Image: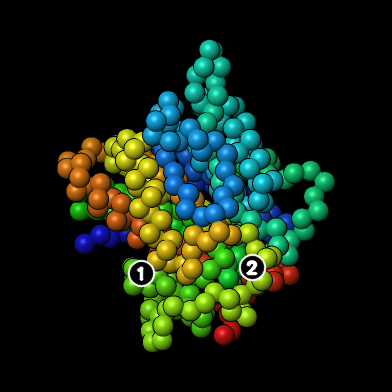
């Protein structure tokens, strides 16, 4: 049986660090993940409206073998500049690809839309490069969940979203983890607001220990009065799954694709034209696969379950901020 790692965070994958920075007045933030060595990384987009930076180089046929950090950010297109702040910090620390005597840090990024969450968005200067630098400076194996980092201003269909994470230690010694900024058009719960779609995959009471949804049909229209008007929404769930198994870029691509099952299990509906749903998949290349077929299959399965659990944990831990247009899970009244 798969069990969570000691922290139940993506940083149970040895060598990974996560840093968060947020501005609660703007209601936005940045999350950075990095490793001791460049990370073999690929990605998969299944939403209709992604916002990204440097993702083309993650395709299996592209030359670059590893990246120096990954960024999840709020701010829509403005938030892509958070990666520039991280690039600056990496360069200061001498980390990056050596090209013709120069250090060039490689930092792919993805963003969520959090501009309609009630925060003070009329900034004179784009705040995201600075938030990216702060997040890098806060790198740590331990970090909080909920309204922090890229999850600070996250929203869902009926309630606030948030930053979530979860992990599994497999019987073969391999560790798998997920990190996610859940900001979907759809919902992480049924329409009562009390039962998580991911509840069948919960370990212990990591997101409340509540029962799974029961009764009635799941085949309900998302055109419900409790949802914000779709024309006002351009939302996204973006995340990272990681493992210490030694994967190729092609295998990381398969891992990222499989992990989207976790989004579909935890958010109903998901992968809509309005969502920019994206998952990065990274390997620290520490442990060889003893059986390439079955080990990879188990890693993919574990990653999808970690992603579902991480989404619910992010929503469950969201906190109320002044002026929020949406309730949190813990103060939601159906």
Going from N to C along the chain, the mark reached first, 2 or 1, is 1
Above or below, 321 against 84 in this view is below
Q: Residue at x 54, y 35 (%)?
A: 54
Identify which residue, 239 or 129, lies in the foreground.
Answer: 239
Q: Secondary structure at mark 2?
A: helix
Q: How many marks?
A: 2
Q: Residue furthest left?
A: 291
**Tag shown at residue 37:** none
- Relative to 112, does residue 64 appear above or below in the rendering? above
Can residue 20 be seen here? The reply is no
132 up-or-down from 92: above or below: below
Q: Quadrant of the N terminus?
A: bottom left
Depth check, mark 2 against mark 1: the one in front is 2
Furthest residue in direction top, as rendered: 100
Residue shown at 54% from the left, 74% from the top: 222
- The residue where tag 2 is placed is 230
SS label for mark 1: loop
Rendered image: mark on residue 202: 1
Q: Position of residue 233 (x, y in %)?
A: 65, 63
Position of 291 compared to 218: left or right?
A: left
Report crowding for label 1: few under 14, some 14 to 19, many 20 or more residues within 10 A (C-alpha): many
Q: Is 27 located above or below residue 52 in the figure?
A: below
Image coordinates for residue 196, horizontal then vertical, percent: 44, 74
Please state the horizontal and vertical placement of residue 198, each as a whole percent of the image. 40, 69
Task: Give how far apart the Cα atoms at labels 2 and 1 are.
Answer: 30 Å
| 2 and 1 marks in contact (CB < 8 Å) | no
User: In percent of the image, x 25 and y 59: which residue is there?
Assistant: 2
Q: Is residue 65 visible?
A: yes
On the image, the x and y values in percent for residue 70 come to 51, 41
Image quadrant of residue 61?
top left
Q: Quadrant of the C terminus?
A: bottom right
Which residue is at a point 41% across and 83% down the rendered structure image? 217
């Amino acid at each position: 049986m798969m069990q969570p790692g000691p922290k139940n965070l993506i940083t149970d994958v040895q060598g990974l660090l996560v840093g968060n920075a947020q501005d609660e007045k703007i209601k936005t933030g940045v999350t950075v993940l990095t490793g001791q060595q460049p990370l073999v990384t690929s990605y998969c987009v299944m939403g209709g409206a992604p916002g990204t930076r440097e993702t083309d180089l993650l395709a299996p046929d592209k030359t670059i073998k590893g990246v120096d950090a990954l960024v999840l950010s709020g701010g829509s297109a403005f938030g892509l500049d958070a990666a520039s702040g991280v690039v600056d910090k990496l360069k200061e620390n001498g980390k990056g690809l050596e090209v013709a005597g120069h250090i060039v840090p490689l930092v792919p990024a993805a963003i969520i839309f959090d501009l309609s969450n009630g925060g003070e968005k009329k900034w004179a200067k784009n705040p995201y490069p600075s938030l990216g630098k702060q997040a890098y400076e806060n790198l740590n194996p331990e970090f909080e969940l909920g309204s922090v980092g890229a999850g600070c201003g996250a929203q869902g269909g009926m309630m606030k979203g948030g930053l979530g994470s979860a992990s599994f230690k497999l019987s073969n010694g391999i560790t798998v983890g997920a990190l996610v900024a859940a900001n979907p058009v759809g919902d992480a719960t049924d329409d009562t607001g009390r039962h998580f779609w991911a509840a069948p995959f919960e370990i212990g009471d990591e997101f409340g220990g509540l029962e799974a949804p029961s009764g009635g049909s799941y085949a309900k229209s998302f055109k419900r009065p409790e949802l914000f008007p779709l024309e006002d929404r351009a939302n996204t769930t973006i995340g990272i799954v990681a493992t210490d198994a030694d994967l190729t870029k092609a295998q990381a691509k398969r891992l990222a694709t499989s992990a989207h099952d976790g989004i579909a299990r935890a958010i109903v509906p998901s992968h809509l034209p309005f969502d920019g749903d994206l998952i990065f998949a990274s390997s620290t290349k520490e442990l060889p696969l003893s059986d390439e077929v079955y080990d990879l299959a188990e890693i993919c399965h574990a990653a999808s379950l970690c992603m579902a659990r991480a989404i619910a944990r992010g929503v469950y831990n969201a906190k109320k901020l002044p002026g929020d247009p949406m309730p949190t899970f813990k103060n939601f009244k159906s």
